[in-house]
Amino acid sequence: MPEVLKAPLVVEFPFTRSLGPVQSAFLTGLRERVVLGVRTTDGRTLVPPVEYDPVTADELRDLVEVAPTGTVTTWAWNHEPRRAQPLTTPFAWVLVRLDGADTALLHALDAPGPEAVRTGMRVRVRWAAERTGAITDIACFEPYDGAPVRPGGHTGEFADPLTGIVAPARLDYTYSPGRAQSAHLGALSERRTVGERCPSCHKVYVPPRGACPTCGVATSEQVEVGPRGTVTTFCIVNIKAKNLDIEVPYVYAHIALDGADLALHARIGGIPYDQVRMGLRVEPVWTPGARHPDHYRPTGEPDAAYDTYKELL
């Protein structure tokens, strides 16, 4: 039985967005230890605030301060916190309707165990020691048995409001390539490139997926292609990627390997970035111990005629 391949993969990037007046005031308020909601035309107060009424679609701008104390409306126990969650010890996820609000805010509740949590319990905000204008400025909620706290009547006007935020996005998962791609990866470890031919349209797909994307039928006939190919189109990368030790600018291209009917993408090296062009003939460059080509470089052959690769653009 062939080896089942699998590998842990991480997709991670910083997500940058600008803030409108409502979100700007809400996050700036957290930085200043103030919780703001927004009042709707029918008198409801929404926390966290939104720019448009979810019921009437009216534009909302009437900011109002609510208390840092509130009531748990529902909860769930998290017995095994994950990376970057609010607390490193087991805690409860809670929906809290802050005093003065008509909707509930989702956050963590620091409690010794699930037996200490109940719907209807009173809680208050525990502020983070260092605040930057993010939901994490609320470190968590904690049980509270004191009197309700009166909000200070803040209007939402700040001298130094936030105008944008950078939120890290990350996805951790385990990938298993399946039969077709496992064969493709196995061939790459031998410095060969293998695709599969569709029994209906006879196109050769690299890397293979186990089925023809055009006809929808299963593929099994293996076909070795390349190693040389033709640049069909490309882009010049000017922004350096995190954890990628490649100096910018560099070129990333779609390459139609000889014998393949689908272009794959790879980096182009061995040539100044401004000399890469459509039709450029290239070949793979391997580094010792690598399981795939490090990049592709020019072969020195004449450029391929446009008609030979136009269907692969």
Image: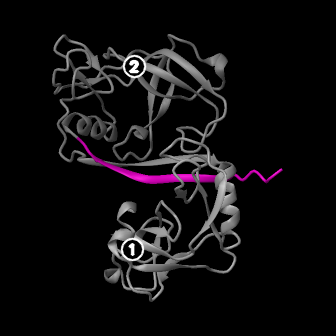
Dot 1 crowding, Cα within 10 Å, few <14, some 14–19, many 20+ = many
Amino acid under disc 2: Ala
**Which region shows up in magenta?**
1-19
Q: Is residue 146 left or right of residue 197?
A: left
Nearest the eye: 205 or 42: 205
Name the residue carrying label 1: 251
Nearest the eye: 106 or 269: 269
Q: Is residue 18 above or below residue 81?
A: below
Q: Label 2, label 1: how many angstroms apart (C-alpha)?
A: 49 Å
Nearest the eye: 269 or 309: 309
**Residue 5 within the magenta-colored segment of the rendering:** yes
Amino acid under disc 1: Val
Residue at (37%, 25%) from the top-left corner? 68
Q: Position of residue 153 (x, y in %)?
A: 22, 25
SS class, disc 2? loop
Kindly report the secondary structure that dominates the magenta region of the rendered protein.
Answer: strand
Residue at (83%, 50%) from the top-left corner? 1
Residue at (46%, 68%) from the top-left corner? 256
Residue at (54%, 57%) from the top-left corner? 205
Decide if residue 235 is in sight here: no
